[in-house]
Amino acid sequence: MTQKKIWKKGITLGVAAALLAGSLTACGSSSGTSSDGSAAAESGSGDGDTITITNVSYDPTREFYEAYNEIFTEYYAEETGQTVEIVQSHGGSGSQARSVIEGSDADVVTLALAHDITLIEEAGLIEEGWIDEFEENSSPYTSTIVFLVRAGNEKGIEDWDDLTAEGVDVITPDPKSSGGACWNFLAAWYYADLLYDGDEDQMKEFVSDLYDNVLVMDSGARGATTTFVENGQGDVLIAWENEALLAMEEYPDEYEIVTPSVSIKAEPSVAVVDENVDDNGTREAAQAYLEYLYSDEAQTLAGENYYRPSNEEILETFSDTFDLSVNLCTIDDFGGWDQAYEDFFQDGAIFDEIYSD
C-alpha cells in the first residue's frame, strides 16, 4: 500500500473544482469550511461520451475515494463503454450537507452519518427512503472511534475516564460541524451511561469534564488529525479508526492506538442526490457509483484504506487490522439519528448544555 499524507488538502481526483469557504451547518449548526466540487455534468449515450459526477464527502475519505474512483472508472468503462470523471469535495460532514442544500451540485453524497443526509432529504433534494436504497442502511463500510496517543503514552490513557483527568489535553472536532465528532460524543456518552448506570446528572458531569479538557476543537476530523499529528498539539486525539491507522502507517514509531473498553459502530451513509442527478442526466452513473462500493473489489479496497467492510466475510480477512472484539454500541441505542440529534446536538440540547457550562 502506498504511503498517504494524512493532512492532504483539496480535491483528490478528477477535474478541478472551485474551493468555496462559507458559513455552514453540521450535526447541529455552526461554521466550517468545505471544498465544493461544482462542475457541470455532461451525459451522453454513445462511445466517447464523458459523464462527470460530483461526490460530496466528509473529511477522512480523501484517500479512499481517490483509489476507489480509479477502479470505478475502469469498471464503468468496461460495462458501458462510457468515460466517467469524478469530482471530489471534502469537509466536515454536516458542513458538506449544508453546502449541498445551499446549491453544491452533488450527484452523490458519502457522508459521516445518516442525519446529515436526512437534512438534504428534508430540503427536498433526496427522495424519502434513501436509507433503504442500498444494503446495510446504505452504509457500504463502517468504522469506530479510538484514541491516538503519542509513543510511550506518557499520560497513561487507556479508557474514556482517563480523558477527564487533570492535565490531559484532548483533541476532537466540533459536533456542530463534524460528523465524526458526533460519533465521538456519543461513544463517550455511552461509556458514561454504563459507568453511572444511567444517572444523567453524573453522565453530563463526566462528559462536561472531558470537553473541559479539549484543547482544540476543529471543524472537521481531518483538521483535528492535522492539529494532533502535524502541529503536535494535545496528548490524545479522539479519532476515526481509519484516521488513527493512517497516522500509524505514516509514522509507525511516533504514535500508538488505544482502543477504549467500549466504542460505537459508526455508519457513514451514502445516497444519490435525486434532484441533481435528474437535472444533470447522471442518475445511471451515480447509482452505479454507489452500488459498486458493495463489490468485492471495492470492499477489499475499503479494508485496505482502514474502513471496516460491510461484507462480513471480507471484514474477517482484515482481523489483523481491526479489533473485531471491541464492545460497540450503535445509533439504535440512542433511538436512531433523529432522536440522537434532538437529544444531543440541536441548538440548546445536551452538547450545548455541557459545553457552555
Image (cartoon, rainbow, N blue to C red):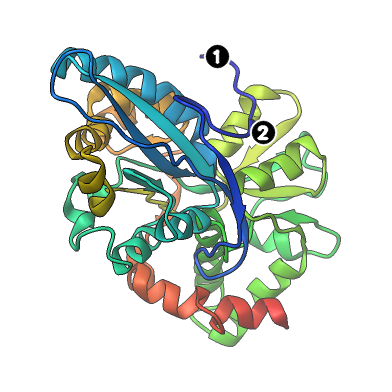
- Disc marking residue 2: 1
Give the SS element for disc 1. Answer: loop
Instruction: Answer with mark 2 or mark 1, whichever residue precedes in sequence.
Output: 1
Q: Please, what is the three-letter code of the amino acid marked with disc 2?
A: Trp
User: Vertically, is 201 above or below 123?
Assistant: below
Give the residue number, with chain letter if any, for mark 2. 7
**CB of mark 2 within 8 Å of CB of mark 1?**
no
- Number of marks in the rendered image: 2
Q: Which residue is rendered at x = 59% and y = 34% of the image?
A: 10
Q: In this view, does 106 lie to the left or right of 94?
A: left
Whether residue 355 can be seen here:
yes
Q: Please, what is the three-letter code of the amino acid marked with disc 1?
A: Thr
Whether residue 137 can be seen here:
no
Q: Which residue is rendered at x = 50% and y = 71% of the image?
A: 194
Residue 154: x percent and y percent? Answer: 83, 44
Query: Label 2 to label 1, Cα distance in Å?
Result: 15 Å
Q: Quadrant of the C terminus?
A: bottom right
Q: Which residue is rendered at x = 19% and y = 40% of the image?
A: 283
Give the SS element for disc 2. Answer: loop
Q: Nearer the viewer, residue 46 or 162?
A: 46
Q: Which of 69 and 231 is in front in this view?
A: 69
User: Vertically, is 46 above or below 180?
Assistant: above
